[in-house]
Amino acid sequence: MYHVYRFPRYPRVHVSTTAQVGLGQWRPHASNTRRESDSRITRRAERRRTTMAAAAAAAKGRVLPLLAVAAALAAAVLYRAPFSKSLGGEGCSLLPHDHFWIASERVVTLGRVGPAAVEVKGGLINAIAVGDYRSFLLRRPVVDYGDAVIMPGLIDVHAHLDEPGRVEWEGFSTGTRAAAAGGITTLVDMPLNSHPSTVSEETLKMKVDAAKDKLYVDVGFWGGLVPENALNSTALESLLNAGVLGLKSFMCPSGINDFPMTNSTHIEEGLVTLAKYKRPLLIHAERIPDVQNDDELDGEQDPRSYMTYLKTRPPAWEEAAIRDLQRAMKDTEIGGRSEGAHIHIVHLSDAKTSLGLLKDAKQNGAKVSIETCPHYLAFSAEEVPDGDTRFKCAPPIRDATNRDNLWEALLDGHIDMLSSDHSPSVPELKLVEEGNFLRAWGGISSLQFVLPVTWSHGKKYGISLNQLASWWSERPAMLAGLKNKGVILPGYHADIVVWKPEAQFHLDDNHVVYHKHRNISAYLGKQLSGKVMSTFVGGNLVFAEDKHATVACGAPILAKWI
Ligand SMILES: NC(=O)NC(NC(N)=O)C(=O)[O-]
Ligand SMILES: [Zn+2]
Ligand SMILES: [Zn+2]
């Protein structure tokens, strides 16, 4: 027996924007903003949205509230593709079809994992047949992936692609090829490390221009909240109107001259404007405490020792930042000054007091979400070799107990999602030879490996494929307001990764790495399981069998406020 979930057969359902959300305390805000779109894909998906919810609800009640949150959080955020190539256009896809089925024994859809066939048509998921899908394989063309996993493509909401200005560090072409090879179908680019930083309408335009014809996956952009624009709502609105999906700010020096840190006043004022647009503020939450522990500063320290570096950025830095954010978080509560805004803490490393404070804030009704990154879950301070600056990042990788506590918080739902924080530089700045932790560039290079890394390490903690899809696709889509992405359901973009969780591989010299600089990644030399076979973006097969499509047909994603 099989059942097909298809657009026209289902009745309309009302998706409440005030539904209780199954995403910790992260509740959406109702909005009366009318949704519309100017892209072909978005319009089509929009017509199907209520039907998808009906299909999902019919199959599994749990899915409906998640759709409600996506709809509500994204109520004012839409996207369009100003220069995307036509679907299935010449060279965009390794598959010569615009309408086809893919099938496997393990499809992650409708809140379950099981046999299913997925119909892809015109860049969208058109129908899903679950159960005895084999009878569907008579319908051609079909790609039968056997027992490989078919899962929503990963959405990486934290990647530094560094173009324009520092293309020698990473770039749109190299970065998105690595993303496609790693099963990432959408990424959102950070506003710093490129030059200039993305802090205005003009600099966003430079980003989008630089990305032209170089995107192998879809790419959105965060803008920067910096002292120069934070208190100037006209400047902020022009950046938001230009299409950034939200803003990002630093509470400590960022290491980039034209991206200065913000204080809590900048953050609180910025949130008021963001509330109007219903877009999130992402915060690098480390702050140099007013009084530093003498232990951390005193004495002759070996700069090649990882412990020396670890002591320079203790958990107290994360804690000080979160304490500084207390008022801003309170402002996001219902009835607060910036109700409608949302605070997202990037790359949380401290699983102790900082996490505890954030849990309390969520409990009290603050609109806060938390991400952590695979390197905090895969590595521990104890195992970082002295002089191996590939492991340097901020906040730092802490001890093994902290790592276990991060996994626990992720599994318990206190940490909402994962991101790569792919932040490479040129090898010279990483000081790999010299091994000086205090002077080396901070940032982990990981984009292509995040799926196998999360899976390889998560297996030991008993993670499921559904959790993986939630942390890497569904919740990141909600954060970025990508209402047609993040799940495999009719009407959503056909952004899909096909991978083999059991396939082991050694990240050795023979492994093809598409990052600009392969040798600065801390994952090189590691044994991993989980091999990406195929990646589809908007129905285009953009990566398969270690080959990319010949033409880069990914779309830039720009938010539109109406
Ligand atoms: N300028 C950076 O890219 N910094 C990044 N560096 C890290 N994470 O070590 C970050 O996201 O904070
Ligand atoms: Zn950061
Ligand atoms: Zn970062």
Image (spheres, grey):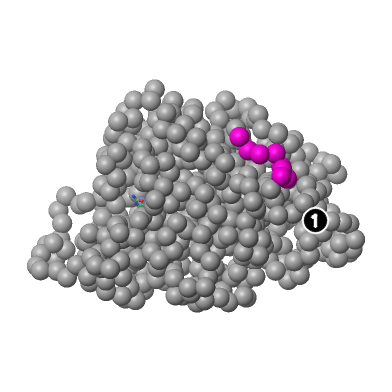
Q: Which of 261 and 165 is in front in this view?
A: 165
Q: In which quarter of the image is the C terminus?
A: top right
Helix, strand or loop for the magenta stretch, by majority = loop
Residue 226 shown left or right of residue 346 in the figure:
left
Q: Does the magenta stretch include residue 471?
A: no
Badge 1 element: strand
Does the image show residue 377?
yes
Give the percent coordinates (x, y) of residue 280: 46, 40
Give the percent coordinates (x, y) of residue 70: 60, 43
Give the percent coordinates (x, y) of residue 9: 86, 44
Residue at the image position 26 percent from the left and 55 percent from the top = 317
Task: Name the outermost residue toward the left.
Answer: 299
Give the percent coordinates (x, y) of residue 135: 89, 63
Q: In this view, does 305 lie above or below 550?
A: below
Q: In this view, does 471 lie above or below 464?
A: above
Q: Nearer the viewer, residue 273 or 303?
A: 303
Residue at the image position 25 percent from the left and 50 percent from the top = 287
Q: Nearer the viewer, residue 471 or 212?
A: 212
Question: Please, what is the three-letter code of the amino acid marked with disc 1?
Answer: Trp
Q: Quadrant of the N terminus?
A: bottom right
**Magenta-tinted stretch:** 83-90
Ligand 3 contact, mark 1 (Cβ < 8 Å): no
Q: Is residue 85 magenta?
A: yes
Which residue is tagged 1? 101
Residue 326 figure quarter: top left
Q: Which of 44 and 542 is in front in this view?
A: 542
